[in-house]
Image: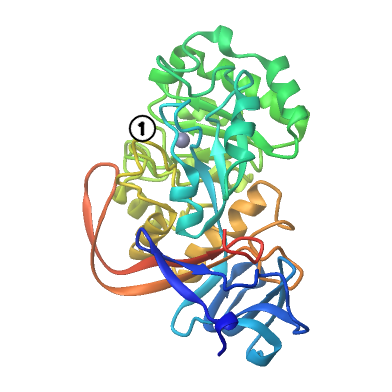
């Protein structure tokens, strides 16, 4: 291996980052591929693939995926034997806009550095602030950031809740902004919690519904101790809409009712295509609720973190930790990867643009170690479970490059 082929690891936080040699990636010097991930176990649920394979990248895209690709055909080779190679993760529920919203975090720190190549902001900004969100977060982040637009004009900027004053519900303004930023807005967000929306929740969901329908994109509904009954709110949900925080403590508006069982109206909503997302956050994930749901074979449609300023230091930490919790609860590794890659990509109708290692796809790739040991996992109630395995991100590539 000559100097130019050398790949050195530099520790940033706990994460080794690939450093390019003197020549930038993108120049193949007559070879077929720029980068080859060799010897890993590839899990790509978009192709129902789970087996040892090599993945070759060129021109920012996946160039080849095969059992054995000759290293001589690639400018650089990264040995990933014993490691897991997946499409870059897609986190369906995050909060950026640090410094503007008290909920916001630096998405690059918690997403791209932890295997998440696409972060979907869940309504941190509304129509009054989306232009700033685009300029300060979407355009500047190394993580690819897309967003649900909050139906409240002010979004999650301050206190009290964004919908306690119903004058903040503004359909024409949301519609104008959603059309203007149609390339990055993937749907409309509305929060139904007594302290954020008071008695205005149903009116806000109707307004959000109207905007979502006019732009042909889904609604993301946050439900957590709402003023109105969950069942009434769900009557307004349509197929492909996302209900987030679904595995919260029983009785607070999640899939588990006060009787400790998956409510019938939840099952009916799921059967007609409403997606129940994790959205862990600081107050919205309970091991007991998730266990009760899984026991009744009611699994989440997507696993998302709801990473924000009050969850980033625990109990969430990041999306791989949230995925680890579902591994511990008995979902297979393939399933957990599916629910954090192709499933959220499908939910926002972006499967052609992300979450696949199929040749021709954008080369967003994550590499993980599945580490054995004794790990403490904590939920939003402070309940601790001891896990024997943990998914640890070791490398992220975005469009085939070091992000
Ligand atoms: Zn959230």
Q: What element carries label 1?
A: loop
Task: Give the residue drawn at x 50%, y 8%.
Answer: 165
Residue 170, given in percent of the width and then of the height, sits at 65, 14
Does 43 sit above or below residue 313?
Answer: below
Could you tell whether 285 is left or right of 234 in the image? left
The scheme the figure's colours follow is: rainbow
Tell me where residue 37 sits by quadrant: bottom right
Residue in the picture at 44% in, 28% down: 99
Which residue lies at the image location 73% right of the left edge and 32% below the top edge?
181
Up/down of 355 relative to 37, above or below:
above
Residue underneath mark 1: 252
- Measured from the top left, where is residue 247 in percent x and y? 40, 45
Q: Which of 148 and 110 is in front in this view?
A: 110
Above or below 68: residue 300: above
Name the residue at 75% across, 68% down. Answer: 59
Q: Position of residue 81 (x, y in %)?
A: 47, 85
**127 to the left or right of 227:** right
Nearer to me, 196 or 91: 91
The answer to whether residue 69 of the structure is visible from this angle is yes
Q: Quadrant of the N terminus?
A: bottom right
**Residue 188 visible in this rendered orientation of the protein:** no
Q: Is residue 269 left or right of residue 183?
A: left
Q: Quadrant of the C terminus?
A: bottom right
Total numbered badges shown on the rendered structure = 1
Residue 129 placement (x, y as % from top left):
60, 22
């Amino acid at each position: 291996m000559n100097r130019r082929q050398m790949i050195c690891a530099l520790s940033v936080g706990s994460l080794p980052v690939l450093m390019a040699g003197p020549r930038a990636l993108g120049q193949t010097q007559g070879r077929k591929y720029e980068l080859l991930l060799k010897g890993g176990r590839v899990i790509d649920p978009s192709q129902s693939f789970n087996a040892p394979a090599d993945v070759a990248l060129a021109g920012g895209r996946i160039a080849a995926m095969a059992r054995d690709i000759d290293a001589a055909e690639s400018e650089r080779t990264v040995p990933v034997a014993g490691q897991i190679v997946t499409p870059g993760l897609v986190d369906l529920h995050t909060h950026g806009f640090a410094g503007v919203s008290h909920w916001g975090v630096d998405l690059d720190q918690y997403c791209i550095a932890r295997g998440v190549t696409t972060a979907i902001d869940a309504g941190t900004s509304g129509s009054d602030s989306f232009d700033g969100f685009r300029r300060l977060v979407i355009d500047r982040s190394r993580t690819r950031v897309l967003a649900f637009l909050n139906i409240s004009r002010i979004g999650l900027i301050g206190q009290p809740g964004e919908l306690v004053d119903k004058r903040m519900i503004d359909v024409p303004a949301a519609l104008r902004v959603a059309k203007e930023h149609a390339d990055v807005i993937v749907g409309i967000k509305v929060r139904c919690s007594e302290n954020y929306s008071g008695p205005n929740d149903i009116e806000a969901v109707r307004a959000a519904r109207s905007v979502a329908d006019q732009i042909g994109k889904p609604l993301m509904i946050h439900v957590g101790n709402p003023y109105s009954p969950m069942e009434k709110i769900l009557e307004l949900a349509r197929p492909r809409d996302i209900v987030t925080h679904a595995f919260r403590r029983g009785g607070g508006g999640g899939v588990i009712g006060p009787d400790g069982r998956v409510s019938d109206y939840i099952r009916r909503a799921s059967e007609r295509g409403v997606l129940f997302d994790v959205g862990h956050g600081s107050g919205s994930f309970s091991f007991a609720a998730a266990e009760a749901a899984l026991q009744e074979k009611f699994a989440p449609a997507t696993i998302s973190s709801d990473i924000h300023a009050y969850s980033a230091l625990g109990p969430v930490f990041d999306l791989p930790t949230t995925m680890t919790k579902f591994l511990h609860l008995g979902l297979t590794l393939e399933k957990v990867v599916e629910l954090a890659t192709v499933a959220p990509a499908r939910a926002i109708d972006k499967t052609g643009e992300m979450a696949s290692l199929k040749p021709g796809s954008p080369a967003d790739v994550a590499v993980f170690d599945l580490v054995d040991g004794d790990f403490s996992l904590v939920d939003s109630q402070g309940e601790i479970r001891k896990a024997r395995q943990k998914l640890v991100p070791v490398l992220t590539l975005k469009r085939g490059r070091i992000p």
